[in-house]
Amino acid sequence: MVELARFAKMNGLGNAIIVADMRGRKDRVTPEAARALAEDPVTRFDQIMAIHDPVTPGTDNYIEILNCDGSQAQACGNGTRCVVQALAGETGRTSFTFETKAGILTAEEHENGLISVDMGKPRFGWKDIPLAEEFANTRRIELQIGPIDAPVLHSPSVASMGNPHAIFWVDRDVNEYALDRFGPMLENHPIFPERANITIAQVTSPSSLTMRTWERGAGLTLACGSAACAAAVSAARTGRTGRRVKVTLPGGDLEIFWREDDHVIMTGPAEWEFSGRFDPATGAWERETEGAA
Ligand SMILES: N[C@@H](CCC[C@H](N)C(=O)O)C(=O)O
């Protein structure tokens, strides 16, 4: 008899998240289970945040992150806010320290319900992102799409927020670009040996930008927190904005602050939809509560 694990279907600005409670268990959410849950329209998600018992002393939990294609991700900003809201509701605590593949991060829920996550320090070295070949200046790398003499997108900034990001700067409305067409090509471009999250961003003032992201392993999403951080630090690093920006995504706004100590703080909301129980091996699930979905 399989012991089912509890989960909460949530979202962070429309980034569809399953928070899976794997505490006290030795098993993992399998890629097969992730793909099965992603195929069901009710549990369709962009990322699973699987909360495990802590590994490193001093941390509250280890979090494994799965994309809807079953691959693993090192970081997920919107999902981390969902985990904080779920655990804050359960424990009454407001601050947490988590470990992910990208390292240790801290997060806190504010009195107004918004949640801030310290997403750590960005990295800009070509091997850190990683890129397949050396680029001394990652503010702008040679990569373009479209006709050679009139590229549609070109010269992205690249950055790692634990996971790989490329940000293409555009002058026009980000919705005018066929990201659903270019996204898969760019995500899988040979320059990105671990694939990459692909963002189109338009700077709208020295303290704001608008963006859309094609996520590695998930496709078009309504929001990507780590991409918002990567775009914000890249905008500041290239002189396009200051270090505190409002980032507008299809699902809503995030505030990103690149502190002087190099840490990137992302602040935004999280929302619970419904809860259930699932089999981490197969993805078979049942509903526990009625909810919005
Ligand atoms: N939605 C996330 C990022 C998810 C991870 C990404 N698809 C990857 O594989 O790196 C966020 O909010 O940061």
Image: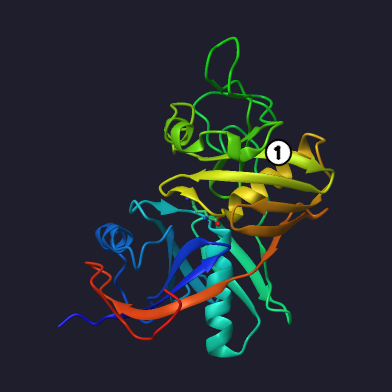
Does the Cβ of the disc 1 residue fall within 8 Å of ligand 1?
Answer: no
Q: Is residue 125 above or below residue 92?
A: above
Instruction: State left or right for residue 282 relative to residue 96.
Output: left
Badge 1 amino acid: Gln
Q: Is residue 247 above or below residue 54?
A: above
Identify the coloring. rainbow
Image point (29%, 63%), residue name: 40
- Percent x, y of residue 118: 68, 63
Instruction: State left or right for residue 222 relative to residue 170.
Output: left
Image point (49%, 39%), residue name: 196
Secondary structure at badge 1 equals: strand
Q: Residue furthest left?
A: 1
- Percent x, y of residue 108: 67, 74
* Residue 57 seen in the current view: no
Q: Residues within 10 Å of mark 1 (few under 14, many from 20)?
A: many
List the residue tagged with mark 1: 202
Asked where in the image residue 49 lies, by quadrant, the reply is bottom left
Q: Is residue 233 above or below residue 223?
A: above
Q: Quadrant of the C terminus?
A: bottom left
Q: Is residue 29 above or below residue 217?
A: below
Asked where in the image residue 265 lies, by quadrant, the reply is bottom right
Instruction: State left or right for residue 290 relative to residue 116.
Output: left
